[in-house]
Image (cartoon, rainbow, N blue to C red):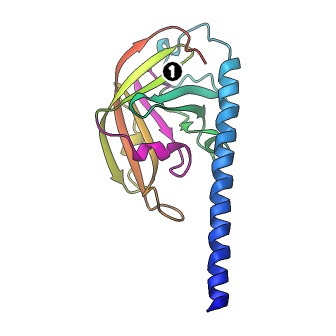
Amino acid sequence: MRSLSWLLIIAGLLLTGYGAYDFYLSQLGQDEARQQWSEQPVPTSLPTLVPHYFNPYKPGDPVARLRVPRLERTLYVVEGTDQRDLKKGPGHMPGTALPGVAGNCVIAGHRDTHFRLLSEVQVGDEVELDTHYGTFRYRIRSMQIVLPTNVASLKPTRDAVLHLITCYPFNYIGHAPKRMVIEAVLEGSGTGQATS
């Protein structure tokens, strides 16, 4: 019994250490994205004037600053959704519309680091995406839990729509079996450089 107790304590400490290390790496990634964002040159043309498949960003580049005003939270969104990109921050899915552009803008993130804040959002909340070519305000209109095989949220749209996607449930240990999909619609925008 005593051996089992020690094994459980050690396992708990290892899991806690792994979680803390993962959190530390996510904060480090956000610091790097924030620095890159402040040094990024302002584009000479607005991506809103070109088709949604035009994308000047390379994997890992900061694409936008995502803010949820009600929660007073800010995250830096990077281009790409592979593991290296998602360690840095929520990732804009290549092939989907850029923020503010007509079409479906998809941003995915890990539920246990950056996108943990999605557990606190509500229908009606505002989501702002600051870019160097303007600020775009979206309003959350729906939230749903789906199976990973449900890819309806990745399909192209005619209107400017934002989908935020993360694994679910939030407190699940291991690979979570479902996905949380949050859909928001563009309500307004302002042009000009978004400051750091």
Quadrant showing the C terminus: top right
Whether residue 195 is in magenta: the answer is no
Q: Residue furthest front?
A: 2
Quadrant in which residue 188 is drawn: top left
For residue 34, side relative to residue 133 (left or right): right
Graded by Cα atoms within 10 Å as few (under 14), some (14 to 19) or many (20 or more), the crowding at tag 1 reads many
The residue at the point 46 percent across, 36 percent down is 106
In the image, residue 128 lies at what x, y percent? Answer: 44, 25
- Residue sitting at the far bottom: 1
In the image, taking residue 99 as reference, residue 193 lies left or right, namely right
**Residue 35 rendering spot, x and y as whole percentages:** 70, 26
Question: Is residue 130 something one can see in this rendering?
Answer: yes
Residue type (three-letter) at the residue carrying disc 1: Asp
Residue at image position (63%, 66%) is 15
Q: Secondary structure at mark 1?
A: strand
Q: How many numbered circles are shown?
A: 1
For the record, the magenta segment spans 98-123
State the image coordinates of residue 135 (x, y, percent, origin top left). 47, 17
Instruction: Please indicate, yes or no, whether residue 60 appears anywhere in the rendered image.
Output: no
Disc 1 target residue: 130
Instruction: Please tell me whether residue 190 is drawn above or below residue 72 in the rendered image.
Output: above
**Is 73 in front, or is 62?**
73
Q: Nearer the viewer, residue 159 or 24?
A: 24
In the picture, the quarter occupied by the N terminus is bottom right
Query: Image height check: is 64 above or below 82?
Result: above
Q: Is residue 114 magenta?
A: yes
Residue shown at the point (37%, 26%) measured from the top left: 138
Q: Residue at x 49, y 47 (%)?
A: 116
